[in-house]
Image (cartoon, grey):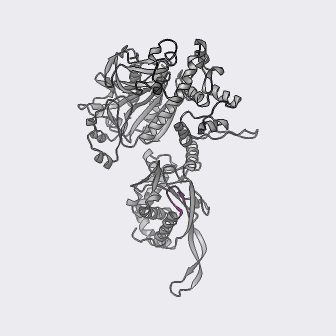
Amino acid sequence: MNSPHRSLAVRELGTIEYSEALELQAHLIRERREATIPDTILLLEHPHVITLGSSSDYAHVLLDAGELEKRGIALFEVGRGGDVTYHGPGQLVVYPIMDLKPDRKDLHQYLRDLESVLIKVACSFGVQANRDPSGTGVFTELGKLGAIGVRVSSGWITSHGIALNVSTKLDFFETIVPCGVRDRGVSSLERELQAPVCMAEVKECMVESFKQVFSS
Amino acid sequence: MPQMGESITEGTVSKWLKQVGDTVERDEPILEISTDKVDAEIPAPSAGILVEVGVEEGETVEVGTVLALIDPEGIALVDTTPDKTLEPDLVAPSLAATQTLDVSQSAEERLRTRSTPVVRKIAAEHGIDLTNIVGSGHAGRVTKQDIVAFMESSGATGADPPTISAARARDGVPIQSEPSSLWDSFYKEVQHPEYPVRPADQVEGMDKMRRLTAEHMVIAKRIAPHVHSFIEIDFSVIDRIRTLSRSRWEAQNARVSYTSFVAWAVSRVLRDFPMVNSVVSGNNVIYRGNVNLGMAVDLDPGLIVPVVHDADHLGLVGIGNKIVDLAGRARARKLMPDEIQGATFTITNPGVLGTVVGLPVIPKGTSAILGIGSIEKRVAVVTDQQTEMDVVAIRKRSLFSLGYDHRIVDGADAARFLSALKEMLESFPEDA
């Protein structure tokens, strides 16, 4: 294993409610700003939830409130970049709470770094994923594999982050227009491989890829 | 518009967090911008009063565009531009005092006042002049530790407002900058006190499961006011059904333990006691729409609680098989994440190891837990149905304990729930 020059704490949270993750992030952002914790990444899954970023269009949520409730899908408007997205079981969500001040004060570079992490993880499962000039995130031929939506709080502290479809039930994406893009599908590692993928293994790769990308 | 990255040429103002006339602290976020997939807070480059906003929400502007003007407090009030003096009522009264402090400062003194908003807030609350404190931070910045140490050493002089934080400060309890952080630390964080190690001792780190269990238990006890009630259950009827069905179940390769009977009965009785299948959430009560039974499994060492989802839709044999399956995979560490999530009620079985009764802790996020004590033959007084005479008999019995959150479940509710459960178990339907 590399020895990264910045230490990275990893917290595995299992499945937690979206609201709980928001609170936890707010708390950790304060702690990171006060330097009482090191750079930290949260690994988790959410129950079914649709979130709207700051540039979201409500028209991209295709179900009305009643229907969402019936299907047990929560809806949140949140202060992250990007359009509407879906989180749910089988999707690995990673929220890095990092201080970009020392050497990474560049929002675009940060997005590219997150894409690199996703590409590396996909690659270690033999799935080739790529950036796409049309938007942030990583894509395969079948569609979007990983989504990105980020917030940088005062003091260059990051929150929100990336969502990688591992064994996500992809029909849930039919309830929205993912990231406002209509003409591309969504994909998952399992769809790519046509075989079950072990979430624990994906988490391991995720942590490893994070260390590689953010220690260079 | 600040340069937020080499290739970033423009940004959209998504939200103003401060309005014209607001006082802003240095480094305090004053607006949010968004640029493709990133939302970013833009902090104030210096303290002062926001006097002009140049860009509307929704507008996209190039890097370098002036977004707003901040008038450095105090300085504008006295020496340089008197005509720009602000309306006194634009300034929050409590801050007005600190600002007049700034007025008389030399450049050197102002440097020493450099501090975080938290520190300035503490200083304002306690009437402390920051120039009296030697800062240990960068360039003499006064840190929170500095000001707390200063207050402890000087006995926190000044006109303390009778607030909770002031009272705590006098007792030497660290000051929380915001109420929510106290809340967070109380309900989300657990710190275990440390003890000195003696020479013959051996010290080991807790593994993840132990650590999570420890944190969960502390939080569960902090949040829910626990009460326990007990009832004794006669297993004669259940024993008879087990004997009658044994060969049929063996043919089906089914495993139906006593616990399965209890789980089946609990899942049915819970329908009539929604408060026992609920959770207190803020000032609300969430009555759960499903009956998901957490079944505590001893891993020796360790404890895990897999969940029988929608137990009220499963038959007795279905529940029995599910419990065997979950417990087996729990011991093999092969549970899927969603199989240990979402419990709405929990059953624990301290009796399997011979203990008569337990006082179980209510898992966080639920309102009750049932403990099954040892099921054993006891001497019981029963009424002979034919002669209507009381006789001493040998009966298989068990003491059940219900731990419940008294915020939502009252003693009488618990008693009614336990009585209904007793009734169900002692006249267990043969077609379950």
Image coordinates of residue B103 in percent, x first then y, are 56, 17
User: Please, which residue is most extreme toward the left here?
Assistant: A183
Image coordinates of residue B229 in percent, x first then y, are 56, 63
- Queried whether the magenta region covers residue B405, the answer comes back as yes
Image coordinates of residue B423 in percent, x first then y, are 48, 71
* Tally of numbered discs: 0
Q: Quadrant of residue B131?
A: top right
Image coordinates of residue B23 in percent, x first then y, are 47, 25
Q: Quadrant of residue A61?
A: top left
Looking at the image, residue A65 lies above or below residue B269: above
Residues rendered magenta in the picture: B402-411
- Queried whether the magenta region covers residue B383, the answer comes back as no
Q: Nearer the viewer, residue B147 or B285?
A: B147
* Image side of residue B377 versus residue B319, left or right: right
Looking at the image, residue B188 lies above or below residue B230: above
* Image side of residue B233 versus residue A178, left or right: right
User: Please, which residue is most extreme toward the bottom here?
Assistant: B387
The answer to whether residue B226 is visible is: yes
The answer to whether residue A142 is visible is: no
What residue is shown at x 40% (from left), y 28% (from top)? Answer: A150
> Considering the image in quadrants, where does the N terminus of chain B appear?
top left
User: Please, which residue is most extreme toward the right here?
Assistant: B199
* Image side of residue B427 versus residue B214, left or right: left
What residue is shown at x 56% (from left), y 19% (from top)? Answer: B102
> Considering the image in quadrants, where does the C terminus of chain B appear?
bottom left
Q: Nearer the viewer, residue B125 or B376?
A: B125
Q: Nearer the viewer, residue A115 or B25?
A: B25
Q: Quadrant of residue B380?
A: bottom right
